[in-house]
Image: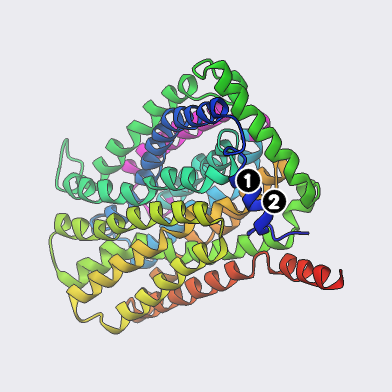
Amino acid sequence: MQNPVEPKTEHAASIGSSESSTSSPVSEIAQRARHRIGRRMLPFLFLLYVIAFLDRMNVGAAALQMPHDLGFSDHVIGLGAGIFFLGYFLLEIPGALIVERWSARKWIARIMISWGLMTVLMAFIHTARQFYLVRFLVGAAEAGFLPGVIVYLTHWFRYQDRAKAVAFFYAANPLSYVIGSPLAGLLLGISWFGLRGWRWLFIIEGIPAILLGVITIWYLTDWPAQAGWLPADERSWITTELQREKEGKKRFGSHSIWQALRHRDVILLTFCYFCAMSGSYGIAFWLPTILKRLSGLSDLKVTLLAALPYVAAFITQQVNGWHSDRSGERRWHAAIPVFVCGLALALAVIYRSNLAVTVGLFVLAGGSFYGFQPVFWAVPTRFLTESAAAASIGLINSVGNLGGFVGPMVMGYLASRTHSFTGGLLYLVASLFVSGTLMLAVGTQATVRDGSASQGN
């Protein structure tokens, strides 16, 4: 059995040469189809993910005012931020399967409308219990969105184009911070109808999700065969290519959903993602508060500083996804970014007394980390297909995103106990290094078997 992460050279060569060996008209059809599908799908999905992350992480900006207004401690804020992922956890696998077996556009539309409503509801909380409940409901409402989109992209993009497609979609993640941080800073400064800025932050950022959810119902198309906007020759080409890819995966063996969930590499990817998300969300949620306490700057200036890591993240994300597709290598392209992120955080702890150096190291941490995700999500679709792939992506994302619960919660707990972010940041460093190590272990068992088999021959 071949390495599911890095296929053998002869197989990679055959994939890369498939278009060059065909006639020129077919190559032209392929180019037109890929460009048309990309232009139709990716900008809209990008916009949806921007809105998703604005609504997921606006609580980090709200935490600059909300604790004072409601009397919440760092521990309450950290726990409330993390509880989002408990609700998120429950519906991830069912959501991914619904996209594969029923309808992506209807499910994604439902998700957006419901999470938009729950985000607006956040503006009207008054107690810690209400905070926990609504954050849980926001997470439950959004559950299935990310794995659903990852599965949906496999309906439209071939494996050799997938990391670039995911990188374009994932660019919404860092750019949502670039857009959202200064926007949040401005919204925190308003006070209308007796409501403080943090309450308007939730109201104003929740409404676009509801509106875009309605648009999603008629804009997205579930399968290429249903795409009236795609010319017949292009529709035939992408359908044939995806069917050929599906048949090619059968040489890895056919997996039921249960077999896929117990697959060694799926388990490794799940824990790898858990540790990575612990580090990522721990940084993302607490960064505005850390910078505020280090600098004493205004809320607007703090949110502008907090956006800087995500400018760098956008660049590394696109370059790493493009280079991974071009080289065909996945493991090191996913592992190196989290190692660099962990190292940058460790240095930020050492140089925490110097604001300029600390900000620079946070920029390096954010910029490096976001090169990880586009490559990471190309891996499970390399050796799994259909419902097995959908369920595995749901498992990886649901368990992995529990790291989004653990990271902010541990940071908040340690900050309350020690009155310092040092211990929490070191916890995030350890999580990131474990994540990179687990990523490098993916596919190694298959490599050993291949090597043993070749020696035996």
The circle drawn on residue 162 is: none
Residue 54 in the image, given as x and y percentages of width and height: 34, 45
Image quadrant in which the N terminus is located: bottom right
Residue 4 in the image, given as x and y percentages of width and height: 68, 57
92 or 36: nearer the viewer: 36
**Left or right of 290, for residue 128:** right
356 or 27: nearer the viewer: 27
Instruction: Classify residue 396 by image quadrant.
Output: bottom right
Q: Amino acid at mark 1?
A: Ile
Q: In the rendered view, tell whether residue 8 sits above or below residue 361.
A: above
Residue 16 in the image, given as x and y percentages of width and height: 59, 46
Count residues near mark 1 (Cα–Cα under 10 Å), then give few for <14, some for 14-19, many for 20+. some
Secondary structure found at label 1 = helix
Q: Do we see residue 299 in this rendering? A: yes
Image quadrant in which the C terminus is located: bottom right
The residue positioned farthest toward the bottom in the image shown: 350
Q: Which residue is mark 2?
A: 383
Secondary structure found at label 2 = helix
Q: Which residue is mark 1?
A: 15
Q: Nearer the viewer, mark 2 or mark 1?
A: 1
Residue at x-position 51% and y-position 51%:
325
Q: Amino acid at mark 2?
A: Phe
Which residues are drawn in magenta? 100-129
Instruction: Classify residue 261 by image quadrant.
Output: bottom right
